[in-house]
Image: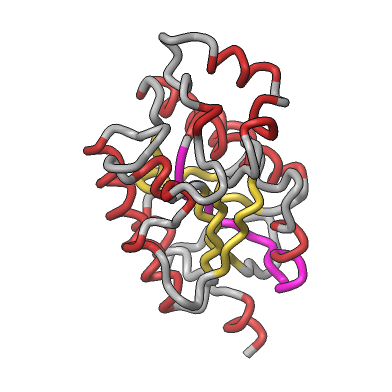
Amino acid sequence: MTTMNLGVDVPRAALVAIDCHCGHLDPEVATMPVAADAARRVVDANKRLMDWCRGVGIPVVHLVTRYRDATEIASNPFWRTRAEDPKATRKNVLKHNLDGMPGCTVMADLLDPADRIVDTKKRYDCFRATDLDFHLRSHGINTVIVTGVNTNSCVMATTTAANVLDYAVIVARDCVDTMDDPALHHAALSIIDTAFGWVLSTEEIMALGLAGPAREAA
């Protein structure tokens, strides 16, 4: 076990998986796809870390983007400009994860019946207009392990928000990726590691001896 100062007296952890859904990671239905090889790596790495977390009592919380209609998406001014630019990586934003689309489903390999799902995410910051903060705090969580996509948008925005809300934040380096330029993935990890939280590999996370709230309470 590795001793590491996370800035909290007793770390009580949860894994927060951001948009590990078919809308990004299933090439057959994704409307804003991560490259197929990267998507497979992300799924495989997340499965490994999630299985370990469940085994040591760390809850897994899935954040899923879901919109009632395109108007909820288009109310973001910058996103509207992406939809109007045929060269933009995110040009399909107004068609992404509308209610009822197959993309709104968590990847089957990553979902366990004991996991929790927050499927009201509508912006990059997973705390914005969702009950994620309430859920975590009501279960005594003070440390979040962040995984998912996209590193340079939702992962970075959520990590920043978690830091501002005084959570200890760990980003699992091998469990995140992006649909954008790989350079942006690496830049986002550097920014996070400098100012908002720790960027660690799955092996390094496993070596920390973290536990979830149930184990701590016991």
Name the one closer to the observer, 110 or 65. 65
On screen, residue 111 above or below 164:
below
Query: Which region of the structure is painted magenta?
Result: 136-149
The quarter of the picture where the N terminus appears is bottom left
On screen, residue 20 above or below 205:
above
Q: Residue at x 38, y 62 (%)?
A: 110
Name the one closer to the observer, 8 or 76. 76
Left or right of 44, for residue 113: right
| Coloring basis for residues | secondary structure
Q: Residue at x 56, y 37 (%)?
A: 154
Horizontal and vertical percent position of residue 162? 69, 47
On screen, residue 85 above or below 56:
above
Most extreme residue toward the left is 37
Left or right of 92, for residue 79: right
Horizontal and vertical percent position of residue 143? 63, 60
The quarter of the picture where the C terminus appears is bottom right
Horizontal and vertical percent position of residue 107? 37, 56
**Picture quadrant of residue 108:** bottom left
Q: Decide whether residue 143 is among the magenta residues.
A: yes
Horizontal and vertical percent position of residue 112? 42, 72
Q: Decide whether residue 24 is among the magenta residues.
A: no
Left or right of 1, for residue 153: right
Q: Residue at x 22, y 38 (%)?
A: 37
Q: Total label count?
A: 0
On screen, residue 187 above or below 101:
above
**Picture quadrant of residue 155:** top right
